Image (tube, rainbow, N blue to C red):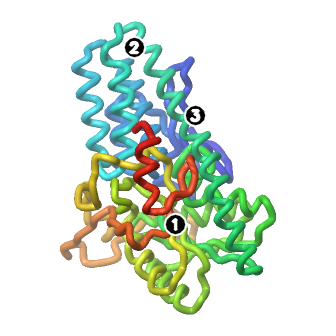
Amino acid sequence: MSVESNSPYTVFIDEAERRVAVLDQRLLPHRVEYVDLKNAQEAAEAIRGMTVRGAPLIGVTGAAGMALAADESTETGFLIEAANLLKSARPTAVNLNWAVDFMLKRLKGMEPDRRRKAAWHLAAEICEQERTMSIRLAKHAQTIIEALYLKLGRPLNILTHCNAGKLATVELGTATAGIYTAFEAGIPLTVYADETRPRLQGTLTAWELKAAGIPVCLIADNAGGELMREGGIDLVIVGADRIAENGDTANKIGTYLKALAAADNQIPFYVAAPISTFDWTAKSGGDIPIENRSGDEIRWVRGIDKHGHEREVCITDPGIATVNPGFDVTPARLITGFITDRGVFALEDLKDLRMNSHV
């Protein structure tokens, strides 16, 4: 299915028709197309192959995959196998584990006919929860941006890494949620988006912000530190794929370096994520599994040539060895605070957050 839109929806879950369609983010920003997912295997492949991206959206897609699995078979064993398959697709993103485990726990004791109906209802419910989460998170993020604007008395420059925007969620995003609402409220700002090699998710951040009319500048990954040193960045907001009990945060590779640069230049560095991204079973960053991806992501780049043709080109000797971790862990000591759908929390407040999270 192909559509034309400057701000496309990332996922459709049709409870009545029992249909799932996701935006194929591998084709952005050059083409906007949707892919129908017909079974749990296809849902897992969409997650693993990065057709869908961003921890919240991955979680929603995992829930949709469980609904598809409930349609495929009435056997509880099949549902458990589907859950394991989906969770293995992107091991660092805890939202995926949370959504799939939630679905499995609720469904496995049900009668088959009731299970099918309940599975689609639960998947749609998780999708709606992510939507409302993003709106609530935006409110809390906007207070931080507004306060900094009032303090400095001039337009703000905000740096973000990877894509934690609309394309990574179901609504406003996480790292960009407050940026959208602050801009709509009249706060003058410019966003500096890291390109985020090797999959260039930052180019999608730039694309979606530009479509919304928000001033944005795409920068090379290694430029952020120099911009901070020159005084060109006022605030850093990033998303997260998993946050440990002690506040250590796993996010897209390169986030740690931005946190170091921010700390060295006394620039506030916030992590924006829903409560479902906190993994209270992980005591520290050392307990977070880091996904290692194919070296071809480094060797090959896809884009449009000057004639308007889509091409994939090799940018190095294809025989050169590579190391390609998909994520890194930013130590909690480098993080100013955590922007969640339940408020903004300093590191010392995470214990209270856990006690009240019911996770």
Q: Quadrant of the C terminus?
A: top left
Whether residue 51 appears in this view of the structure is no
The quadrant holding residue 350 is bottom left
Question: Which is nearer the N-term, disc 2 or disc 1?
Answer: 2
Q: Label 3, label 1: how many angstroms apart (C-alpha)? A: 25 Å
Secondary structure category for the residue under label 2: helix
Residue occupying the point 53% across, 28% down: 125
Mark 3 or mark 1, which is nearer to you?
1
Where in the figure is residue 185, as x and y percent of width and height? 79, 60
Question: Which is nearer the N-term, disc 2 or disc 3?
Answer: 2
Q: Which residue is mark 2?
A: 115
Q: Which residue is mark 3?
A: 128
Q: Which residue is mark 1?
A: 270
Secondary structure category for the residue under label 3: helix
Where in the figure is residue 154, as x and y percent of width and height? 76, 80
For mark 3, does the 10 Å Cα neighbourhood hold few (<14), some (14 to 19), or many (20 or more) residues?
Answer: some
Residue occupying the point 27% across, 67% down: 324
Where in the figure is residue 98, as x and y percent of width and height? 37, 38
Indicate left or right for 288 with 180 as reference: left
Indicate left or right for 202 with 209 as reference: left
Which amino acid type is marked by label 3?
A: Glu
Asked whether the beta carbons under mark 2 and mark 3 sit within 8 Å of each other, the answer is: no
Residue occupying the point 46% across, 66% down: 200
Q: Nearer the viewer, residue 184 or 324?
A: 184
Whether residue 155 appears in this view of the structure is yes
Q: Nearer the viewer, residue 237 or 120?
A: 237
